[in-house]
Image (cartoon, rainbow, N blue to C red):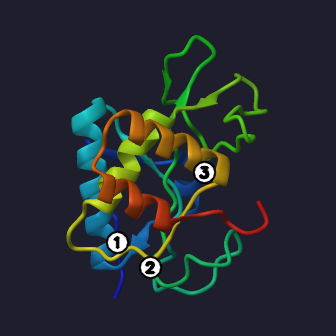
Amino acid sequence: RGRMLPLPSPHYEILPRQLERQLFYGTDALISLVEHTAAEFHKTHERRLKVGHLSRRGGGDIRFSVSHNSGRDLDLAFCYLDVKGRPFDRLRDLIPVDKKGKSRWKGGHTFDPACTWTIVKALLTHKETQLQYIFVYEPLKRMMLKHARAAKEPPELILAADALMWQPGKS
């Protein structure tokens, strides 16, 4: 009983590659989580959240992921800065980065832990959804938690983020 993520939205957009694949279906709870997270992100940054894969219509396996088959999984793009330190929003796909948060892709993008923390915070503060995992490369997790501590975020929020953020396998 999945439903399509409502499009268009002033608060989020599906990345072009993922939009082509039509993997934007999820449970009511997942759709609510995306809408909440995107609204909070937009409120803070006046930018649209970049959404990757959800699930295909009707569920089932997809060749791009070992999960994302039940409408309960979600990929969100992190925040990046360009070489001049400005927010980079012209994403076509998810950008892989190294342990220092640097992209090897053309353009020299850098992971923005402060901005990305606002996404994690919004995920954690959505009252209607019980999260099981937030998969994040361990060095990026450490950067975000360091930012959260420096920003004096509530300790219980930082502990929850630390407990839910896990290094994905084979990455």
| In the depicted structure, whether residue 154 falls above or below residue 150 | below
Which image quadrant for residue 126?
Answer: bottom left
Residue displayed at 55% across by 47% down = 16
The earlier-in-sequence mark between 2 and 1 is 1
Residue 96 shows in this picture: yes
Residue linked to disc 1: 30
- Check disc 1 and report its element: helix, strand or loop: helix
Q: Residues within 10 Å of mark 3 (few under 14, many from 20)?
A: some
- 155 relative position to 69: left or right: left
Residue linked to disc 3: 17
Point out the image quarter for the C terminus.
Answer: bottom right
- Check disc 2 and report its element: helix, strand or loop: loop
List x then y, in percent, for residue 148.
40, 41
The earlier-in-sequence mark between 2 and 3 is 3
Residue 7 shows in this picture: no
List x then y, in percent, for residue 52.
52, 56
Residue linked to disc 2: 71
Which image quadrant for residue 92?
Answer: top right
Q: Are marks 2 and 3 in contact (CB under 8 Å)?
A: no
* Nearest-to-viewer mark from 2 and 3: 2
Residue displayed at 65% across by 54% down = 137
Q: Are marks 1 and 3 in contact (CB under 8 Å)?
A: no
| In the depicted structure, whether residue 96 falls above or below residue 170 | above
C-alpha span from label 2 to label 3: 19 Å
The earlier-in-sequence mark between 1 and 3 is 3
* Nearest-to-viewer mark from 1 and 3: 1
- 162 relative position to 7: left or right: right
